[in-house]
Amino acid sequence: MAQSKRYSERASAHTNPTAIRLFQIMERKQTNLSVSADVTTKAELLRITDAVGPYICCLKTHIDILSDFDHDLIDQLTALAKKHDFLIFEDRKFADIGNTVKLQYSSGVHKIASWSHITNAHIVPGEGIVKGLAEVGIPLQRGLLLLAEMSSAGSLATGEYTLEALRIARRNKEFCIGFIGQRRLEGLIPVEEKEDFIYMSPGVGLTSKGDGLGQQYRTPREVILDSGCDVIIVGRGIYGSGDTVENAKTYQKAGWDAYLERIEK
Ligand code: 5BU
């Protein structure tokens, strides 16, 4: 099972260029932390990114919440990704028919596919959404995560819906590198040979249990060790209060310790 293997072993066995890069970064920097910097100005986003850069494998963005978005921001984020050695994941949550998402991914103001190594999609529209995104993403060597589960209370992504995400990913392995989810799913349907999906999990907090708007938090240990996920996604737990750099270091250590415990089990 992938969860008992080192990220480096998984890098050597993988075929998707983005998945390989992510695993290599995780091993090199000893981090399975992705920071979600959900702020609304360019200056704040760049400040947080530069501060947490050394401790993360991936920066998660919501590019459409910025009130002063411009292409210089993309140039600067790309430069920071090079400087600190991390990937960029635009949490766009595409949710339309294949033809529309293809345009949303490649065009518009944000041109997401041109700079974001990873993006994600709901499977509500059916498999055509993956086909549409893949037409843009595969030539650029990008990776897609499917939303198999959500961290919020009352999420409808459960049961058969969640399993369908796994089935769709299996049929589109060249582009689908994994899932946003709360736990590793392979145990639910027999594992296929040479299959290795990456599980990124939001809703991670060491002190808070929720935010009053439906978000639910689990600890890095619950996410990585108990649920077998690979990457912890942390937002307000890092930039919300206290010292951003110290918080990032704390989550990096908690996530990495849980990973070491998992592979040594
Ligand atoms: P927080 O500040 O750590 O609660 O931020 C969590 C981030 O992860 C935020 O950007 C959400 O949009 C994102 N997220 C989530 O919280 N839960 C989910 O199931 C998915 C994304 Br998918």
Image: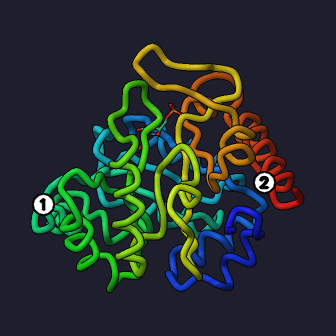
Tell me: 50 left or right of 73: right
In this figure, which residue is indicated by the disc labeled 2? 259
Q: Considering only vertical position in the picture, is 193 above or below 204?
A: below
Q: Where residue 132 sits: x, y (%)?
A: 19, 71
Tell me: 8 left or right of 56: right
Check the image and tell me how it is coloured: rainbow
- Spatial CA distance of label 2 from label 1 is 37 Å
In this figure, which residue is indicated by the disc labeled 1? 97
Q: Considering only vertical position in the picture, is 258 above or below 205?
A: below
Q: Residue at x 59, y 76 (%)?
A: 21
User: Which numbered disc, 2 or 1, marks the residue that appears first in the sequence?
Assistant: 1
Most distant residue in the right direction: 264
Q: Residue at x 63, y 52 (%)?
A: 229
Q: Where residue 77 sits: x, y (%)?
A: 47, 59
Q: Where residue 226 sits: x, y (%)?
A: 71, 43
Residue 8's disc is none
The image quadrant of residue 168 is bottom left
Q: Secondary structure at mark 2?
A: helix
Question: Which residue type does callout 2 highlight?
Answer: Tyr
Q: Is mark 1 within 8 Å of ligand 1?
A: no
Which quarter shows the N terminus?
Answer: bottom right
Question: Which residue type does callout 1 highlight?
Answer: Ile
Closest to the observer, 153 or 191: 191
Q: Considering only vertical position in the picture, is 247 above or below 265?
A: above
Q: Secondary structure at mark 1?
A: loop
Local crowd size for mark 2, using a 10 Å CA cut-off: few (<14), some (14–19), many (≥20)? many
